[in-house]
Image: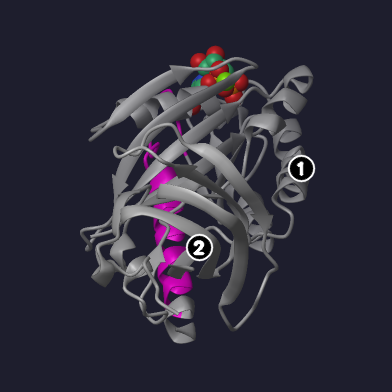
């Protein structure tokens, strides 16, 4: 399965709410679950992925830790405006291993996806990988 | 370099000096400061604190809740998910000290099991002739509750930075700890 969210295929992170220099948001789209973006305190926390071109998305898979509630919004504009809500999830708490969650998006079309972590199971959350199909 | 953000609850009985303390902290050697007046008796002070011997900083968003009971519920709604707690009493008022347990319970109930680093602050240390709460007693109670203890005088500008520096350091240590945990997972 090809993975167009990978940075190597031209996707970019155009915004992230917070950052530790050692754990930048680009780690979300490097295809590697060993590298991660770490939030640096308080909620909500968000990041926006821009695709190289408009995409039809059946499913988003997210590897993360301590995320409790997540909202996903999409934009079909070129400049990351006019976001509309498309999904809202509550993830189960895991201990000792990453949370892996599939979020079906039913073939929606988007140029950007915005991920908003509205609450966590701890003060800090990490996002290790986002991929789309 | 890491820039952390921390939501700090400032609670305690009315008139113990919460607002005086946060205003002293805000106006002293600030790198970045803002001041908002909010509805329902909650004031927000934002100030960044450097963590000694690192290039890291913690931006404290200090929510100063009004102590009057009528405001409490409205304040609780604005607490959100707190990061750290600053619990204040007045060393010249035994009553304000005895309320601390109730404040702590209320905050913990709101936090749903999440560990919140905190400090206990005995303010008005300048009122030595009217002191009703001995340092050792406050210290001991703080320790039993896992809180660090500081005495301050907002009036005499004594030690007002210390509780907030402690909170920033506690939050920074928590970040380091959680980062380690996550690194070990990956
Ligand atoms: N003597 C003395 N008075 C103080 C001190 N801090 C605050 N006050 C006074 O205590 C009163 C209540 O202070 P305030 O900050 O409004 O208390 P809050 O209700 O807890 O926010 C005011 O009259 C302050 O001037 C202090 O360190 N020493
Ligand atoms: Mg006040």
User: What percent of the width, then of the height, locates residue B26?
Assistant: 35, 29
In the rendered view, would you say B162 is above or below B174?
Answer: above
Count every numbered label the image shows and give the total.
2
Front in this rendered view, residue B3 or B154? B3
Residue B183 horizontal/vertical position (percent): 42, 80
Residue drawn 23% across and 35% down?
A: B31
x then y, percent, for residue B141: 68, 55
Do callouts 2 and 1 mark residues in contact (Cβ within 8 Å)?
no
**Quadrant of the image containing the C terminus of chain B:** bottom left
Query: Residue, x 25% and y 71% (percent of image)?
Result: A8
Q: Tag 1: Cα neighbours inside 10 Å, few (<14), some, or many (≥20)?
A: few
Marks 2 and 1 belong to one chain: no
Q: What mark, if any, has residue B46 been given in the picture? A: none
Whether residue A3 is visible here, answered yes or no, is: yes
- Taking the image as drawn, is residue B93 in sight? no
Range of residues picked out in magenta: B152-180
Horizontal and vertical percent position of residue A33: 42, 79
The residue positioned 37% from the left and 80% from the top of the image is A32
Report the side of A14 relative to A57 (left or right): left
Residue at numbered disc 1: B106
Secondary structure of residue under mark 1: helix
Residue B55 is left or right of residue B144, and the answer is left
Q: Is residue B44 a member of the stretch shown in magenta?
A: no
Observer-nearest of A85 and B150:
A85
Q: Nearer the viewer, residue A116 or B44?
A: A116
Quarter of the rendered structure image containing ligand 2: top right
Which residue is depicted at the point 64% across and 79% down? A95
Residue picked out by circle 2: A125
């Amino acid at each position: 399965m090809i993975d167009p969210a990978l940075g190597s295929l031209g996707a970019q992170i155009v915004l992230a709410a917070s950052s530790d220099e050692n754990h930048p948001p680009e780690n979300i789209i490097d295809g590697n679950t060993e590298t991660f973006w770490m939030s640096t305190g308080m909620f909500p926390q968000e990041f926006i992925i821009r695709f190289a071109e408009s995409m039809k998305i059946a499913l988003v898979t997210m590897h993360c830790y301590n995320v409790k509630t997540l909202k996903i919004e999409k934009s079909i504009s070129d400049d990351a405006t006019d976001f509309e809500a498309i999904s809202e999830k509550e993830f189960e708490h895991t201990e000792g291993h990453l949370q892996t969650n599939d979020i079906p998006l039913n073939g929606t079309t988007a140029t950007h996806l915005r991920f908003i972590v509205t609450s966590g199971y701890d003060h800090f959350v990490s996002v290790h990988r986002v991929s789309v199909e | 370099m890491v820039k952390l953000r921390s939501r700090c609850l400032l609670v305690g009985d009315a008139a113990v000096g919460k607002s005086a303390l946060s205003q002293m902290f805000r106006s002293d050697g600030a790198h970045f400061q803002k001041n908002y007046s909010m509805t329902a008796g909650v004031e927000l002070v934002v100030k960044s604190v450097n963590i000694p011997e690192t290039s890291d900083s913690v931006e404290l968003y200090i929510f100063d809740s009004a102590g009057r009971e009528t405001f409490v519920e409205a304040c609780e709604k604005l607490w959100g998910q707190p990061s750290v707690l600053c619990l204040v009493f007045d060393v010249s008022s035994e009553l304000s000290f005895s309320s601390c347990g109730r404040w702590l319970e209320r905050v913990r109930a709101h936090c749903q099991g999440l560990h919140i680093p905190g400090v206990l602050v005995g303010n008005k240390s300048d009122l030595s002739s009217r002191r009703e709460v001995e340092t050792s007693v406050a210290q001991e109670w703080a320790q039993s509750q896992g809180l660090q203890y500081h005495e301050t005088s907002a009036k005499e500008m004594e030690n007002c930075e210390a509780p907030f520096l402690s909170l920033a350091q506690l939050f920074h240590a928590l970040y380091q700890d959680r980062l380690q945990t996550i690194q070990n997972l990956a």
